[in-house]
Image: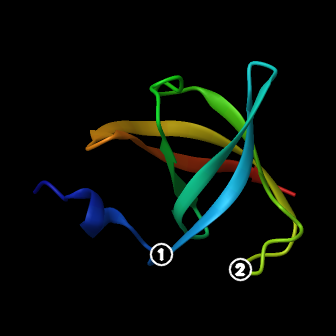
């Protein structure tokens, strides 16, 4: 039996658009967060600078009305080309 990504997901994702800070290889970017749940999140990037298995640091801004300040380490588990950029799926490794 083959399960789709949707069927394997234990927790529903909260869909919204917000800005988050990411750090990768010493470089900081502000990117759009598309959704989040207890296990991970999705980001939108204009370029394909992140690759599968990359480890990044994510920080929700403490001025964001959707979430309090939050830091997480995450692993890139999927990079998907979309109309004008890339949708990046992340799995949380640590949240603090």
Nearest the eye: 29 or 96? 29
Image spot of residue 94 (x, y percent): 76, 50
Nearest the eye: 35 or 1? 35
Numbered badge on residue 66: 2
Which quarter of the figure is the C terminus placed in? bottom right
- Disc 1 and disc 2 in contact, CB within 8 angstroms: no
Looking at the rendered structure, the secondary structure element under dot 2 is loop
Give the CA separation, mark 1 to mark 2: 11 Å
Looking at the rendered structure, the secondary structure element under dot 1 is strand
Please determine whether, in this image, residue 39 is positioned above or below residue 49.
below
**Seen in the image, is 30 located left or right of residue 82?**
right
The structure residue drawn at horizontal position 58% and vertical position 62%, both measured from the top left corner, is 39
Label 1 neighbourhood size at 10 Å, few (<14), some (14-19), many (20+)?
few
In the image, farthest residue toward the top: 25
- Of mark 1 and mark 2, the one earlier in the sequence is 1
Label 2 neighbourhood size at 10 Å, few (<14), some (14-19), many (20+)?
few
The image quarter in which residue 80 lies: top left
Which quarter of the figure is the N terminus placed in? bottom left
The structure residue drawn at horizontal position 84% and vertical position 75%, both measured from the top left corner, is 68
**Seen in the image, is 85 located left or right of residue 34?**
left
Colour scheme:
rainbow
Image spot of residue 37 (x, y percent): 56, 70
Numbered badge on residue 50: none
Nearest the eye: 40 or 26? 26
Image spot of residue 31 (x, y percent): 62, 47
The structure residue drawn at horizontal position 45% and vertical position 26%, both measured from the top left corner, is 48
The structure residue drawn at horizontal position 77% and vertical position 80%, both measured from the top left corner, is 65
Q: Which residue is mark 1?
A: 15
> How many numbered callouts?
2
């Amino acid at each position: 039996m083959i399960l789709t990504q949707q069927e394997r997901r234990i927790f529903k994702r909260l869909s919204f658009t917000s800005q988050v800070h990411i750090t990768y290889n010493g470089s900081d970017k502000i990117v759009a967060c598309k959704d989040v749940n207890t296990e991970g999140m999705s980001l939108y990037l204009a370029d394909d600078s992140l690759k599968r298995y990359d480890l990044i640091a994510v920080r929700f801004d403490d001025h964001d009305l959707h979430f309090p300040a939050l830091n997480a380490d995450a692993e890139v588990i999927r990079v998907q080309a979309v109309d004008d950029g890339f949708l990046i799926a992340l799995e949380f490794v640590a949240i603090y």
